[in-house]
C-alpha cells in the first residue's frame, strides 16, 4: 500500500467538482505534503473521507478539514491559532502553509495535548506550539493572530477570540446550538460578531473548564450529581413516596 499515492488520491477527490472543497493551490499542496497516516493508528482510515474517534478526540474527515482551511485562507507568514488541537493534523497542514513556528494550538484536554505534541513532533512539525488551556480564552500572550480557527461549536464567538484578531485577521468558527453555521469574522468586525455564514456544519460543542474528556472534576461531578439524586430519593418518606409510586407505575388500585 503506497501511502503517498493514497494521499494524492484523497486530495484529488477533494478537488473534484463532486466535492469541490479544495480550491486553492496552497491548501492542495499542504494536504499533499502532510503524511496524514502519522496522525492516526490505522493507515486504512487515514485517507478515507470520514471522521472517527481517536484517543479521546474526534478526527475530522479530510473534506471537513479542507472546508475549514479554505475558509481560513491563511497565507505564508500568518500567525495562526487553532482552538481544538485534536490529533494535530489541521495544525500540521497549516504549518505547511504559514510555517510551523507561526502555528499555535490549544486544547482543554491534557491527554489530547500530549498526544498532539508527540504526533506533531514525530511527523516533523515539532515547531508547532501546543498548549493545554480553555480555548474560549484564546492565547493572549501570543496575540494578535492573523487567523484563528475553532474546531468546535459555540452559541456565539467567544469575545476573547474576536479581540485577539489582528485588524485584518479572520476568525473561522462553527456557530449555533443545534443547527450550526460555519462563520467567518473579520478583524475589523470586532463590534459585530455575526460574521459571514459559509454553510452548515456539525461540530461538538466548545468545552470549558471542568468539561475535559479526561477530567477528574468532570467525572466526580457526574458521580456526585447521581449520588445526590439517589439520596434525595431515599429521603422521601410517608405520603411523598406513596404519592410518587401511586402516580408512576402502580396506577389506581381498588
Image (spheres, rainbow, N blue to C red):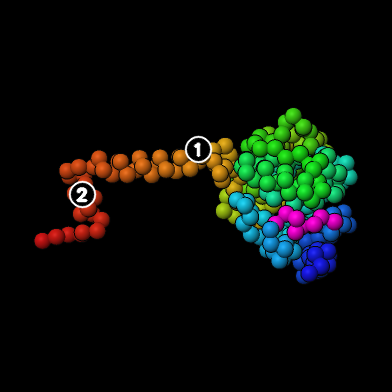
- Mark whose residue sits in front, 1 or 2: 1
Residue at the spot x=77%, y=32% of the render? Answer: 142
Q: Is residue 152 magenta?
A: no
Q: Quadrant of residue 202?
A: bottom right
Task: Give neighbour class at mark 1: few <14, some 14-19, many 20+ (Cα, 10 Å).
Answer: few
Q: Position of residue 19 (x, y in %)?
A: 76, 66
State the residue lying farthest toward the left.
Answer: 254
Q: What's the magenta bit mostly, secondary-structure-wise? A: helix
Q: Quadrant of residue 126?
A: top right
For label 1, the residue is: 217
For label 2, the residue is: 243
| Element class at badge 2 | helix
The image quadrant where one finds the N terminus is bottom right
Q: Position of residue 203 (x, y in %)?
A: 63, 53
- Tell how many labels: 2
- Residues rendered magenta in the picture: 33-40
Residue at the spot x=88%, y=41% of the render? Answer: 77
Residue at the spot x=50%, y=38% of the render? Answer: 217
Q: Nearer the viewer, residue 166 or 43?
A: 43
Task: Give neighbour class at mark 2: few <14, some 14-19, many 20+ (Cα, 10 Å).
Answer: few
For residue 2, say whether it is visible.
yes
Q: Is residue 13 above or below residue 237?
A: below
| Element class at badge 1 | helix
Q: Is residue 162 above or below residue 74?
A: above
Q: Quadrant of residue 157?
A: top right
Q: Nearer the viewer, residue 24 or 127?
A: 127
Residue at the spot x=40%, y=41% of the render? Answer: 225
Q: CA distance from mark 1 to mark 2?
A: 36 Å
Q: Nearer the viewer, residue 122 or 104?
A: 122
Q: Position of residue 250 (x, y in %)?
A: 21, 59
Q: Nearer the viewer, residue 78 or 124?
A: 124
Amino acid at each position: 500500500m503506497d501511502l503517498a499515492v493514497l494521499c494524492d488520491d484523497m486530495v484529488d477527490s477533494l478537488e473534484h467538482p463532486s466535492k469541490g472543497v479544495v480550491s486553492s493551490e496552497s491548501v492542495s499542496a499542504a494536504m499533499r505534503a502532510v503524511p496524514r497516516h502519522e496522525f492516526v493508528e490505522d493507515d486504512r482510515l487515514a485517507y478515507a473521507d470520514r471522521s472517527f474517534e481517536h484517543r479521546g478526540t474526534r478526527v475530522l474527515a479530510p473534506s471537513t478539514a479542507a472546508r475549514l482551511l479554505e475558509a481560513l485562507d491563511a497565507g505564508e507568514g500568518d500567525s495562526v491559532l487553532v482552538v481544538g488541537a485534536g490529533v494535530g493534523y489541521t495544525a500540521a497542514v497549516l504549518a505547511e502553509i504559514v510555517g510551523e513556528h507561526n502555528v499555535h494550538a490549544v486544547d482543554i484536554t491534557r491527554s489530547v495535548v500530549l498526544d498532539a505534541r508527540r504526533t506533531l513532533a514525530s511527523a516533523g512539525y515539532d515547531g508547532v506550539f501546543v498548549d493545554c488551556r480553555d480555548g474560549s480564552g484564546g492565547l493572549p500572550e501570543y496575540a494578535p493572530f492573523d487567523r484563528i480557527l475553532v474546531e468546535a461549536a459555540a452559541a456565539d464567538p467567544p469575545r476573547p477570540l474576536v479581540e485577539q484578531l489582528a485588524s485584518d485577521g479572520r476568525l473561522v468558527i462553527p456557530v449555533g446550538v443545534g443547527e450550526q453555521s460555519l462563520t467567518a469574522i473579520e478583524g475589523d468586525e470586532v463590534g459585530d460578531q455575526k460574521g459571514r455564514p459559509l454553510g452548515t456544519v456539525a461540530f461538538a460543542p466548545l468545552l470549558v473548564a471542568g468539561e475535559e474528556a479526561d477530567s477528574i472534576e468532570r467525572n466526580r461531578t457526574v458521580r456526585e450529581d447521581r449520588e445526590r439524586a439517589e439520596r434525595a430519593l431515599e429521603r422521601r418518606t410517608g405520603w411523598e413516596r406513596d404519592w410518587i409510586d401511586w402516580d408512576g407505575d402502580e396506577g389506581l388500585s381498588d
